[in-house]
Image: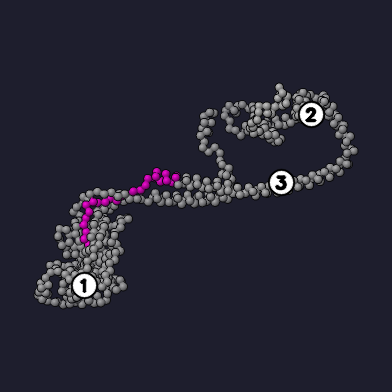
Amino acid sequence: MGVKQAIKSLDAFPRAEEHLLQKTQSGAVVSLVGLFIMATLFLHELRYYLTTYTVHQMAVDLKRGETLPIHINMTFPSLPCDVLSVDAIDMSGKHEVDLDTNIWKLRLSRDGHIIGTEYLSDLVEKEHQHKHDGDKDHNENSIHAHGFDQDAEKTIKKVKQALDNGEGCRVYGVLDVQRVAGNFHISVHGLNIFVAQMIFEGPNHVNVSHVIHDLSFGPKYPGIHNPLDETARILHGTSGTFKYYIKVVPTEYRYLSKEVLPTNQFSVTEYYSPINDRTWPAVYFLYDLSPITVTIREERRSFLHFITRLCAVLGGTFALTGMLDRWMYRLLEAMMKPNTRRVSRFKVYDTRKSLRGRQREGEKRGEMNQNQQSSEGRHDDDAALSDFLASLMDYTPTIPDELVEHYLAKSGFQCPDVRLIRLVAVATQKFIAEVANDALQHCKARQTSIIKDKKQQKDKRSILTMEDLSKALREYGVNVKHQEYFADSPMTGLDPASRDE
């Protein structure tokens, strides 16, 4: 029994609060709002748990002997495809003029629509012996030696016609270069210097305006940002050379499935120089490799972390909605109390009014019946009362006559008639018997509602407790549970005789 009581004492919720036992409209609204908030937060936490995050690590780059892929997608709106070429030079001084590349060119109209496709391998610079800033006499002698053939005239005529029509060119594809520092550029260097002079009438008329749609050094991974994507450089009324200095950072992206994607990131700075008489305009991309490689690894949050956050969020929301429901219940209760008092006052007033009306009607009827039966029933009542009083002389009640006389005298009532004293004793005995019977019924009801152990089931005795007695007396208007009070002096509450003693 002691162990069970000790266990019960550990209960943090001994009883439900009063507002939780009543179903109200305000409670229903708070419950729906709480459920909606908890569902929203649950979906948010679930999405947060299922979403992966990345961890970055750095180490020294140990790769060597590999190629570097360069993905190009650019548009030259003011130069035809016939005059554009791609040239690449690495740090060792190797100049590749006929690259084994996969580069394509799209002819564009003035409005940007595609009107033709050409492969760049036939358009790269074939003979790089001549230099644009070389000796002019050497170029003139070469032209006089070889003559101005018919193919060159067709090329000049075709390019001039394309310039008059406002044709542009889009260059896209992949360059595979050595994994060392170097540069590649797109320009009109593939043309013979004399042919270029005949077409553009000087470097100042070569407009290298361009739009870089995509420039990357390997495949793309989630979250990568290439700083030159969608970069536009448009020239108006002048020309010059664009140089982009690129720092390439080797990168490995490790997916959650352990798949590894080798690629590269890069940063860039830009420089523009106006044209001079000794150089022709071009767009240069000068790249260098970083000695540090970056490893990006996908990871997912732990399930215990998800459960902890979920319990915190849902528990906090449940506690908050419980507090909100309690406040709303008390607010509505405080607002409804004045109205309840008014209604109760009106009800009491109406009840009193109806009782007074009924009492008056009863009095009238009683007076009429009394006048009719007074003469007939007076004789019978006197005879019955005489017989009852005479029987009291032969009856010995349970309560002694001395005890009754004592309490009557204490109440200030002196009665020499023994019959009246015994009448009070009989009435008291009947009252005590009814109270004891009601207390017994309360005791039986209490014992049937209590979970008993084996010893209590064998013991069928009924024990009168103060709790049962107070419930029985409360039905007769007697309250035995008085509030505690403190006497002003030790003699307070004593009768005069005790005080004199």
Q: Position of residue 416 (x, y in %)?
A: 82, 25
> Are the two marked residues, 1 and 2, in contact with CB atoms closer than 8 angstroms?
no
The residue under the point 75% across, 27% down is 410
In the picture of the structure, the residue carrying the numbered disc 2 is 413
> Are the two marked residues, 3 and 1, in contact with CB atoms closer than 8 angstroms?
no
The residue under the point 18% across, 54% down is 65
Q: Can you tell which quarter of the image residue 175 is in?
A: bottom left
Q: How is the image coloured?
A: one colour
- Dot 3 or dot 1: first in sequence order is 1
Cα–Cα gap, marks 1 and 2: 139 Å
Q: Amino acid at mark 2?
A: Phe
Q: Secondary structure at mark 3?
A: helix
Question: Magenta stretch: residue 153 in it?
Answer: no
Which image quadrant: the C terminus? Answer: top right
Circle 1 packing at 10 Å, graded few (<14), some (14-19), many (20+), is some
Q: Position of residue 357 (x, y in %)?
A: 78, 47
- Dot 2 or dot 3: first in sequence order is 3
Circle 2 packing at 10 Å, graded few (<14), some (14-19), many (20+), is few
Q: Is residue 129 left or right of residue 76?
A: left
Q: Is residue 120 above or below residue 315?
A: below
- Dot 1 or dot 2: first in sequence order is 1
Q: Amino acid at mark 3?
A: Val
Circle 3 packing at 10 Å, graded few (<14), some (14-19), many (20+), is few
In the picture of the structure, the residue carrying the numbered disc 3 is 348
Q: Can you tell which quarter of the image residue 201 is in?
A: bottom left
In the picture of the structure, the residue carrying the numbered disc 1 is 204
Q: Position of residue 337 (x, y in %)?
A: 63, 47
Cα–Cα gap, marks 2 and 3: 37 Å
Is 312 in front, or is 326? Answer: 326
> Are the two marked residues, 2 and 3, in contact with CB atoms closer than 8 angstroms?
no
Question: Magenta stretch: residue 304 in it?
Answer: yes
Range of residues picked out in magenta: 285-312
